[in-house]
Image: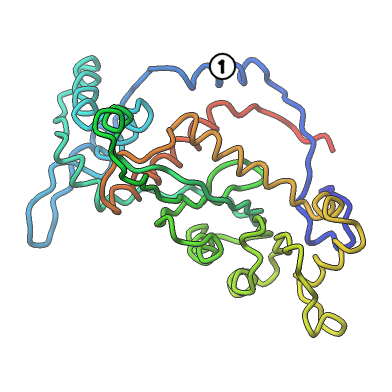
Amino acid sequence: MPFKANADRRHSIPRQRHRVTNWAAYDAGLRARGSLTVWFSEEAVAAWRAEARTTRGGQPRYSALAITTALTLRTVFHLALRQTEGLIASVLALLGLDLAVPDHSTLSRRAETLEVPRPRRGREPVHLLVDSTGLRLCGPGEWLVEKHGTKRRRAWKKPHLATDADTGRIVAAELTDKDADDGSRTGPLLDRVGGPVASFTADGAFDRDDVYTEVGQRHSNAAVVVPPRSSAVPSDTAGTAPTRRDRHIEAIAERGRMGWQRASGYNWRALVEADIARWKRVIGNGLRSHTDGRQATEVAIAADVLNRMLDLGRPEYVRIA
């Protein structure tokens, strides 16, 4: 597998060249992203109703699959809960399926504790690209501001995303309050990945000792590609036992910051920025839910939606170098 030039090639992200082998399927996949075709497999119909519980308490009527399906359609088409209820009812009627429709209050209540399936991972170590963005919360609109001159400050939260550099898929996502710093989410994101990690690439906000510690404790052989701040100095042991951060500082001194970015593979971080741009363009720049649990579910479903859309438009290709 070819690597980008680097003095220590183990710390580099593989750069691969591919050639598309089936352009017709690729074009059809891109068109499929806008398709309104909906179908229910026999397994989905059978799993629509919740299984009987064996413990005390009320019997749920709808399975997690039914709730996830409804909330996914809500995310894709930017619907309110009542509109989602109407969409599900119309789809089931058009398909001639005798299935109950979750009402809007059930969707809201179940979203608080819904377990959304995590993205499936391969066996190969993943090259993680990490970044975060801001999503505004529901609040006064432009009409209210113009009408009443409200001075309420805009509220927002931060989704932290970890993207697979090889596939562009979001493999981990976590929602935090706006005051949470990026570096503190390193451990939780790595725990959500649930598989081997080959490298961890992030921006200068992650230039902290605890970030290197979190990565090292979970994946001792993983490279940490984080640009040191401009005022960074080598550690006291740089001459005898240089750390990974010391090597970055040394490489920047030799090559310059732009040369270090090319040699270390840091420029691959643009892929996670592209995921954030897709999120804002396809899903939106805000959160519709009002509680922490429902907002976390909304973020998890949005990440799954983007991964599915990416798979629909993915070409069939072969490696040529």
Residue at (62% x, 60% y) in the render: 205
The x, y position of residue 39, in whole percent, is 33, 23
The x, y position of residue 25, in whole percent, is 61, 19
Residue at (61% x, 44% y) in the render: 272
Q: Is residue 192 left or right of residue 298?
A: right
Q: In this view, does 165 lie above or below 318?
A: below
Q: In this view, does 318 lie to the left or right of 116?
A: right
**Residue that mark 1 sits on:** 28
The x, y position of residue 138, in whole percent, is 30, 40
Residue at (25% x, 20% y) in the render: 91
The single residue placed furthest to the front in the displayed view is 149
Mark 1 falls on what kind of element? helix
* Quarter where residue 254 is shown: bottom right
Q: In this view, does 81 lie to the left or right of 267?
A: left
Q: Is residue 173 above or below residue 228?
A: above
Q: In this view, does 213 lie above or below 118?
A: below
Towards the viewer: 95 or 145: 145
Residue at (57% x, 51% y) in the render: 131
Residue type pointed to by label 1: Ala
Q: Is residue 320 left or right of residue 126?
A: right
The x, y position of residue 111, in whole percent, is 25, 46
Q: How many labels does the image show?
A: 1
* Label 1 Cα crowd, 10 Å radius (few <14 / some 14-19 / many 20+): few
Towards the viewer: 151 or 104: 151
